Amino acid sequence: MSFEKKQVNYQEIHTKEFISNFIKSFWEFETCEKECDFEILPDGFFDLIFEIKNGQIIKVSLTGVWTKQIKISIPENTKLIGVRFKLISAEYVFKQSIKELKNTKTELPLTTLGFQSFDLYNFEKFTDSITKKLQYGLENLKEIDNRKFELFKILYEQKGKISVQEISERIFWSSRQINRYFNSRFGFSLKTFCNILKCHSSLKHIANGKLFPENDYYDQAHFIKQVKQITGSTPTNLYLNKNDRFLQLTTIEAT
């Protein structure tokens, strides 16, 4: 069985140390000679995306968190650089709720965070400059709520495989208050977020043809139901990835 392969270039740099509590990774994506259509699957992050032409930023977009699959179209010969933020960054980097951005995005000024002055031709230099700028600001914040810091650290480390009750007990924050925080800041519950993280962590297994539960699902039927609820597709259809439809599964092979 053969499918058309999209001609794209992709690379990703993962963060380390302190800044990794706020940013998961930086990514660079380039299309070739024709427009590419994809579907984005929920991953538990939100992105700041720079669209670049001839070494200049022509558009800056901020996404919310995807809770369902989203169709996108990327123009031909287009370069995108993205910063994949963890949810705590909404409050401490952007200082705003991103509830209204759930499953959508908004355009920001080209001068957002002053990144337009950085080297857009060298991906590593660009990401180094962003890291230094954001880390300086975060390290000099007067106060970061330790409960929120620990909450997201646990959630991402456990990839959602932890109960709401256990989280509440570990960080001394009631489940009702945590859910109120999630709904007011992001537009969904903590349980929904855990399910998204758990499903996303299964994508690498699915891409490798492992179509059975490995991440705390009750059984095969529960695994299929949860994956389909979040991605809109069964594990089998995700694995087949016809015409490179699912961007994350396509780029798993590129990293």
Image (cartoon, grey):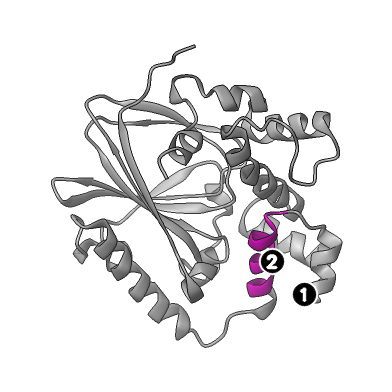
Q: In this rendered view, identify the residue nearer to me: 166 or 53.
A: 166
Residue 153, percent across and down? 64, 68
Q: Position of residue 180 (x, y in %)?
A: 74, 61
Type of the residue with mark 2: Ile
Q: Nearer the viewer, mark 1 or mark 2?
A: 2
* Residue 156 colored in magenta in the image: yes
State which region is magenta. 148-160
Query: Which kind of residue does numbered mark 1 sit on?
Result: Ile
- Report crowding for label 2: few under 14, some 14 to 19, many 20 or more residues within 10 A (C-alpha): some
What kind of element bears circle 1? helix
- Cβ–Cβ below 8 Å for labels 1 and 2? yes
Tell me: residue 1, above or below residue 223: above
Left or right of 191 in this view: 37: left
Q: Residue at x 46, y 83 (%)?
A: 139
Residue highlighted by disc 1: 171
In primary-sequence order, the first of circles 1 and 2 is: 2
The residue positioned 82% from the left and 63% from the top of the image is: 176
Q: Is residue 82 left or right of residue 147?
A: left
Q: Is residue 133 magenta?
A: no
Q: Read off the residue under disc 2.
A: 154
In this rendering, position of residue 56 left or right of residue 28: left
- Against 152, is 120 above or below? above
Q: Is residue 59 above or below residue 111?
A: above
Q: What type of secondary structure mainly makes up the magenta span?
A: helix
